[in-house]
Amino acid sequence: MTTIQVKDEWKADAKLTEDEYRDWYRISVEDPDGFWGEHGKRVDWIKPYTKVKNTSFAPGNVDIRWFEDGTLNVSANCIDRHLAMRGNQTAILWEGDDPADSRAISYRELHGEVCRMANVLLANGVRKGDRVTIYMPMIPEAAVAMLASARIGAVHSVVFGGFSPDALAGRLEGAQSSVLITADEGLRGGRKVPLKKNADRACEIAAAAGQDVRTVLVVRRTGGEVAWQDGRDVWWHEAREEVSADCPPAEMGAEDPLFILYTSGSTGKPKGVLHTSGGYLVYASMTHEYVFDYHEGDIYWCTADVGWVTGHSYIVYGPLANGATTLMFEGVPNYPDASRFWQVVDKHKVNIFYTAPTAIRALMGAGDDKVLSTSRASLRVLGSVGEPINPEAWTWYYRVVGEERCPVVDTWWQTETGGILITPLPGAIALKPGSATLPFFGVQPQLVDNEGAVIEGEGAGNLCITDSWPGQMRTVYGDHERFEQTYFSTYRDKYFTGDGARRDADGYWWITGRVDDVLNVSGHRMGTAEVESALVSHPKVSEAAVVGYPHDLKGQGIYCYVTLMEGENETEELRKELVAHVRNEIGPIASPDKIQFAPGLPKTRSGKIMRRILRKIAEDDFGALGDTSTLADPGVVEDLVEHRQNRK
Ligand code: PRX
């Protein structure tokens, strides 16, 4: 396997040398109180903390607190503290879906907008601790809504704009949220997304389940027609005229909640991952600075959506806490054509670029000339996140996009971790294509086998983290028991990530993907159980089992085995209907790639579906089905193999 040594030019820019990284790392794990006590100061505290780390992973008593007696306001850290030094610097550089559309919002302007929205929320009865749901396109007002909520101590729950009304309703109910911020319509790749219409429907569904939405604040994006409910719906452009552009930030405890973000697990409904204020901000801002080698004045672009954690930590909180110019992109990588990313890089002289392997693979497929027709001379660091990056895509990103001038940082982390946990530091750590390399400060990864025995040295197994870091999630909103059960019960005294990994002879980490029933489709995380429950909610379906299979562009595709109700016919039309049904229930990101009608599913005598076998068949690897002797009806497997949809 190739190793790319750190180049001298990279060293010149780097924040740290390799030796310094190793020293800092050693101190961070030997003396977390000392290390984080020092680095916690990168944030402005209203009342400084005297305690640093107070965390326990012990069964029955998982309790995570950082800087617990300090107080601060996250929005003041992301805006107010920059006003004196860089009030006129661009905070948010917005690039619209249409290449002719862009906007630059200075820190001073951002302050005014955030204060106004905070005042509108207050005027509508939002108080400290209330949950504000945000269902928005990628426009600056999405960040404004998050920061406004943080300013008054409300807890935001951003729901990805691609989710269906049903999915949005479930999240409104879960968070018991009575305030929703949305837009008339979104715009992506020239197509309109009916956000207000979806929001209206979601409010109906939520109301039927007992969760009333009292206020819907609507940002005008396209000017398209929308239905209006007087007394509930409020136009942002009107409400903002009625309030002051000043709103004092609320003093919040370090452990007061900042946001909830719903994410999928291997069972049940998506859970509300809860992040708090102090530790999260320290961790997001510190990782943003060191992992991307952020320097004052850099133009930084993360292509994620604010609906995912990457958008929270690395479009909004990390960069703004560091006083950066953060680029926010409304569109898609291939509109108007597959050069768009690189055209935007040239247009705004982007220095740091952070995207997902699925986009890299798609653009690689569009041909090198789409890249080579642009300059990209401003680029200095390239990042990747969201799923394992195959060495071919890594190498293309490094060679063609970055012309071997820019280190590539493959950053591994999760919604639950709040920030990046395993990553190279540019200019300090030698790179290996496909490896997330080494842990960030304070992060102690460990490999364990299925029985929980620790694997030392070179080897592969389940990835755990043995001690807390400041950005770690604190609980599942409203269900601490589920938090403990999901993350701390598989392996005693450790946080279990749900990922598999390998450690090589140099101590480098290679993340191999989920080892549980979670899919990662184009970097979007999804529970097989969610897709199954969407399928069985169709009146013609009696049973469904969903697995992932390798997909060249998406990383993983969605393969569904569906058993129909007695008397229903297995038609092409029904197949299409089922795909549409899942899109409707969850959203387009959950579209099944393959549907196989299965008269029976492989079950053990106790009735448990043997997914291992289903996965093998989906992978077209049915020669190695393993032990099938526990199957209640071994004949089922032959039928599945014969009718498989994935023939090579
Ligand atoms: O399987 C890992 C994969 O994405 C999962 C987390 O998904 P989510 O919570 O949606 O957060 C995505 C953005 C942080 C992980 O459990 N994953 C994320 N980054 C990488 C990755 N797998 C391999 N390499 C990565 N760099």
Image: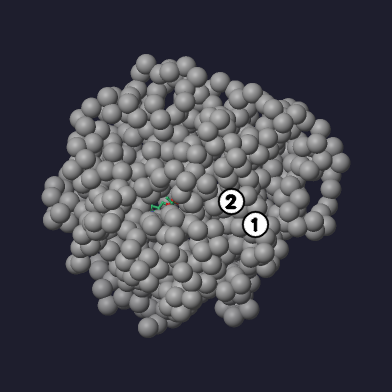
Q: Residue at x 23, y 62 (%)?
A: 4
Neighbour tally class for label 2: few under 14, some 14-19, many 20 plus, Cα within 10 Å = many
Q: Nearer the viewer, residue 451 or 177?
A: 177
Residue 645 placement: quadrant: bottom left
At which x and y percent is residue 597? 51, 74
Residue 102: image tag: 1
Picture coordinates of residue 230, whole percent (x, y):
86, 41
Q: Which of 278/405 is in front? A: 405
Residue at 59% x, 70% y is 335
Left or right of 574? Residue 302 is: left
- Please state which amino acid type lies under the numbered disc 2: Leu
Q: CA distance from mark 2 to mark 1?
A: 8 Å
The kind of secondary structure element at disc 2 is strand
Q: Residue furthest right?
A: 230
Rendered location of residue 564, percent (x, y): 56, 70
Residue 129 position (above or below residue 584): above
Relative to the observer, which residue lies in front, 98 or 13?
13
Q: Confirm or deny contact between disc 2 and disc 1 (CB under 8 A).
A: yes
